[in-house]
């Protein structure tokens, strides 16, 4: 992604996103920034979940160097509050899930949130939502090769959180995931849930 941080659209994104962060009036728009990870992540980062801590501290930089994903660290007034890792994806959907005019494309290009977490010290202030909004911003900006959807795999207890932020369950992908696991003799009880958001709606709202 080219550096978008100085553009008028990015400033608009910073302003709008900050409105929903706790104590919004304390911050100026440029207090909120996102920096692409290109050196080791802050070692003190702790979101309370071993999987997301481990990804950031042990794997995110290698994935960046190997060009398989991009991790962005979010900063509020100079303090790292969280991260989001993005990679290209494509989503196969049921005919009834598919946008009306793209019936011919069985797989629709998507940007995927591979990982996302907010440091414990910053949780519950609207900054996890800011990470989602940043992913929406990146997805909408990539116009040379467009992404129609923003996708993710949610742990079951987070499904409601993502639904309240505009994601819906990707029925076909989820059905296939359950079938694969059941065929292998596994228990689908605690499987991640595939979800997506239509970025076309977000683009047209700008
Ligand atoms: C999931 C996670 C990223 C959410 O981050 P967060 O920074 O707490 O997210 P937000 O503050 O935007 O939203 C959390 C809740 O705080 C509340 N909140 C949002 N803005 C708020 C504000 N300004 N003041 C007080 N509370 C606020 C919201 O009510 C929201 O809850 P709701 O949507 O259930 O009602 C974070 O809990 C986390 O990193 N967990 C561990 C890793 C993980 O589970 N990653 C996702 C894997 S699928």
Image: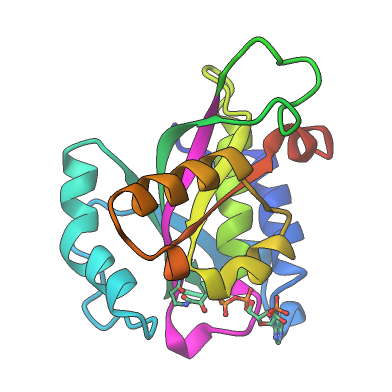
Tell me, yes or no, whether the highlighted magenta stretch contains residue 86: no
Q: Nearer the viewer, residue 55 or 38?
A: 55
Q: How is the image coloured?
A: rainbow
Q: Is residue 148 visible?
A: yes
- The residue that appears at 53% across and 69% down in the rendered structure is 156
Side (left or right) of 47 relative to 94: left
Side (left or right) of 106 relative to 59: right
For the N terminus, which image quadrant?
Answer: top left
Residue 131 is drawn in which quadrant? bottom right
Tell me, yes or no, whether the highlighted magenta stretch contains residue 126: yes
- The residue that appears at 43% across and 46% down in the rendered structure is 179
Side (left or right) of 64 relative to 167: left
Q: Which residues are magenta?
A: 108-127
User: Residue 22's spot in the image, x, y percent?
Assistant: 70, 83
Residue farthest bottom in this picture: 121
Residue farthest top in this picture: 104
- The residue that appears at 46% across and 69% down in the rendered structure is 189
Q: Nearer the viewer, residue 187 or 96?
A: 187
For the C terminus, which image quadrant?
Answer: top right
User: Residue 199's spot in the image, x, y percent?
Assistant: 69, 37
Quadrant in which ligand 1 is drawn: bottom right
- The residue that appears at 52% across and 41% down in the rendered structure is 173
In this picture, is 30 found above or below 108? below
User: Residue 178's spot in the image, x, y percent?
Assistant: 45, 51
Residue 142 is drawn in which quadrant? top right
Residue 39 is drawn in which quadrant? bottom left
Q: Nearer the viewer, residue 111 or 35?
A: 111
Q: Is residue 6 visible?
A: no
């Amino acid at each position: 992604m080219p550096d978008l941080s100085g553009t008028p659209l990015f400033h608009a994104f910073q302003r709008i996103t900050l409105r929903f962060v706790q104590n919004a009036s304390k911050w100026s728009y440029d207090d909120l920034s996102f920096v692409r990870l290109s050196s080791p992540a802050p070692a003190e980062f702790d979101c309370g979940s071993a999987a997301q801590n481990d990804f950031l501290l042990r794997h995110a930089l290698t994935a960046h160097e190997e060009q398989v994903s991009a991790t962005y660290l979010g900063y509020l007034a100079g303090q790292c509050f969280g991260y989001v890792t993005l990679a290209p994806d494509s989503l196969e959907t049921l005919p009834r899930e598919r946008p009306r005019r793209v019936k011919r494309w069985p797989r629709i290009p998507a940007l995927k949130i591979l990982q996302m977490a907010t440091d414990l010290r910053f949780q519950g202030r609207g900054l996890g939502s800011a990470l989602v909004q940043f992913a929406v911003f990146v997805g909408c900006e990539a116009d040379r090769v467009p992404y129609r959807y923003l996708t993710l795999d949610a742990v079951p207890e987070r499904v409601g959180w993502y639904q309240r932020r505009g994601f819906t369950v990707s029925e076909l992908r989820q059905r296939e995931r359950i079938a694969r696991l059941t065929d292998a003799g596994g228990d689908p009880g605690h499987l991640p849930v595939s979800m997506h958001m239509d970025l076309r709606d977000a683009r047209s709202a700008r």
